[in-house]
Every structure is written in C-alpha cells, then in structure tokens.
Image (spheres, rainbow, N blue to C red):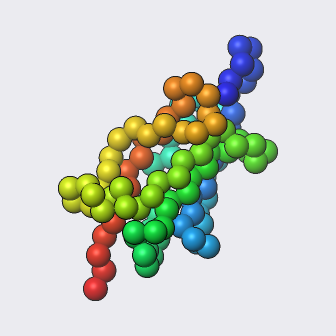
C-alpha cells in the first residue's frame, strides 16, 4: 500500500503449487508493474490444489496475495480464466491481471 509521498516499489511475484515455486523478474519501481511471464506446474489433484501467488517488493515485504483454488479453473470454459483478480492485503483496489489455464498432457 502506497502512502502519499512514498516511492513505488520494485516488485516481483512468486507463484507456487504444492512445493514447486517460480519467481518473476523484479520490475523497475512502478505502481503498475508488468511481468508478462508464463509458468507451468504439474497438477496432480486439481480438486484440492491451489495456486498461491504473492507480490512482494525487492526487500521481500508482501504487497498482496492471492490463493486461487484450481477447482475454479475446472468450472471455466476452456479450463481457463483471464481477468482482474483482487489481491488480499494489498490495500483497497489492489488487483492483478492474471491468466491461468489447466492443460491436459498425454
């Protein structure tokens, strides 16, 4: 959450499903960082697993979090969601544009 007169953070996002995690690059200081990166996870039990996402500043301070139960993707057309999602703990109006999709590998 930014206070008047404070500098915007240099932020990165970490994403995890179970014990597998990825970290984005750290963006230059901005109130609207853009990562445009993709990550793949092997999902074994989509009915009980969640994608855990955290946005942090370069010092590791949490700026906002999201827990996305993968059952939400199972209910979507094309097993995908694409849109703005609110971030918990990020202050009023904190949100993230996220595309998440389940794919089937054979």
**Where the N terminus falls, by quadrant?**
top right
Vertically, is 61 above or below 31?
Answer: below
Image location (x, y in percent) of residue 32: 53, 31
| Furthest residue toward right | 59
Work out whether residue 3 can be spotted. Answer: yes
Image location (x, y in percent) of residue 41: 46, 71
| Furthest residue toward top | 4
Image location (x, y in percent) of residue 47: 40, 69
Work out whether residue 28 can be spotted. Answer: no
Nearest the viewer among 105 and 67 is 67
The residue located at (33%, 58%) in the rendering is: 73
The residue located at (68%, 24%) in the rendering is: 2
Vertically, is 38 above or below 103?
Answer: above
Nearest the viewer among 88 and 14 is 88
The residue located at (32%, 51%) in the rendering is: 81
Query: For residue 14, what is the image quadrant?
Result: bottom right
| Furthest residue toward bottom | 106
Image location (x, y in percent) of residue 7: 72, 24
**Where the C terminus falls, by quadrant?**
bottom left
Query: For residue 28, what is the image quadrant?
Result: top right
The residue located at (40%, 38%) in the rendering is: 84
């Amino acid at each position: 959450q930014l206070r008047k007169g404070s500098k915007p953070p240099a932020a990165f996002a970490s994403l995890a499903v179970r014990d597998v995690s990825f970290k984005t690059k750290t963006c230059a200081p901005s109130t609207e960082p853009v990562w445009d990166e993709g990550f793949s996870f092997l999902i074994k039990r989509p009915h009980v697993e969640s994608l855990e996402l955290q946005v942090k500043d370069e010092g590791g301070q949490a700026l906002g979090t999201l827990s996305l139960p993968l059952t939400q993707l199972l209910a979507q057309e094309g097993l995908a969601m694409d849109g703005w999602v609110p971030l918990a703990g990020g202050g009023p109006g904190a949100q993230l544009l996220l595309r998440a999709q389940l794919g089937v590998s054979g």
